Image: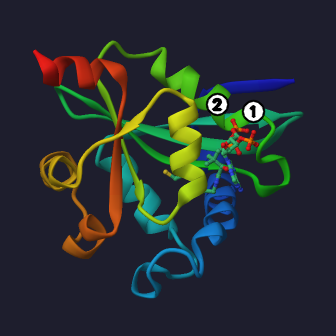
Amino acid sequence: MTDIRTIENGDLGDALAIINDAARAYRGVIPDDRWHEPYMSSTELASEIADGVAFWVAEQDGRLVGVMGMQDKGEVLLVRHAYVATTIQRSGLGTRLLRHVLALTRKPVLIGTWADANWAIDFYRRNGFTVVSNKEKDLLLRKYWSIPERQIETSVVLADSRWLERRRT
Ligand SMILES: CC(C)(COP(=O)(O)OP(=O)(O)OC[C@H]1O[C@@H](n2cnc3c(N)ncnc32)[C@H](O)[C@@H]1OP(=O)(O)O)[C@@H](O)C(=O)NCCC(=O)NCCS
């Protein structure tokens, strides 16, 4: 049985292990100067939480198997740091986690990911998201994210239908 719940202090070590295991998919794919191991340190995770990223975790038979964060930026909500344990990827858990966090908001939702992470882009597209233009991506990443310029260059932004609808009006 899979239970999706908010993260607790006791989950942080297991959550980091999932993030750093799943993030190995980026090695050799994203630009070398952006790759480092571990991909996320405990200090970075703590600082993301302090910065307002609310994490949800998926637990299966008492074991953490997935992590997904959301960050409220006022007019929009960002989905941040989505990771599923490598042993159970492509079995629908990422979709369940994403639907869970999306159901918690009525705000337009944006997601940033590496431009070369085709599988992640595919995952979000299958879940109704659309890649925005490069020009829009630069504006959005500067407005809502705090990431280095080099990461802006090498990322894409995907938007949900609410965001696309709002942009049209
Ligand atoms: C992206 C991720 C969170 C999706 O979770 P998941 O549980 O694997 O996703 P689901 O099972 O719900 O959806 C699977 C779909 O996602 C895409 N996908 C996920 N992993 C993939 C992979 N390794 N290769 C190709 N497509 C992949 C495919 O469209 C896949 O559908 P398919 O299996 O029918 O081809 C997970 O694969 C992951 O942690 N990847 C590594 C880290 C990452 O890229 N995170 C996103 C950061 S924003």
The colouring scheme, among rainbow, by chain, secondary structure or one colour, is: rainbow
Query: What whole-number distance in Å separates the C-alpha atoms at marks 2 and 1?
Result: 5 Å
- Tell me the residue at 66%/37% (across/down): 94
Residue closer to the observer: 58 or 119: 119
Question: What amino acid is labelled 2 in the image?
Answer: Thr
Helix, strand or loop for disc 1? loop
Residue closer to the observer: 81 or 26: 26
Quadrant, the C terminus: top left
Question: What amino acid is labelled 1 in the image?
Answer: Gly
Quadrant, the N terminus: top right
Answer yes or no: disc 1 within 8 Å of ligand 1.
yes
**Mark 1: few, some, or many residues within 10 Å (few <14, many ≥20)?**
few
- Tell me the residue at 48%/14% (across/down): 103
Residue 101: horizontal and vertical position, in percent?
50, 25
Circle 1 sits on which residue? 92
**In the visual, does 93 lie left or right of 62?**
left
Residue 58: horizontal and vertical position, in percent?
70, 34
Residue 89: horizontal and vertical position, in percent?
77, 47
**Mark 2: few, some, or many residues within 10 Å (few <14, many ≥20)?**
some
* 95 relative to 23, above or below: above
Circle 2 sits on which residue? 95
Q: What is the quadrant of residue 68 in the picture?
A: top right
Q: Are the two marked residues, 2 and 1, in contact with CB atoms closer than 8 angstroms?
A: yes
- Tell me the residue at 74%/24% (across/down): 3
**In the visual, does 129 lie left or right of 94?**
left
Q: What is the quadrant of residue 165 in the picture?
A: top left
Answer yes or no: disc 2 within 8 Å of ligand 1.
yes
Residue 159: horizontal and vertical position, in percent?
33, 34
- Tell me the residue at 28%/48% (across/down): 51
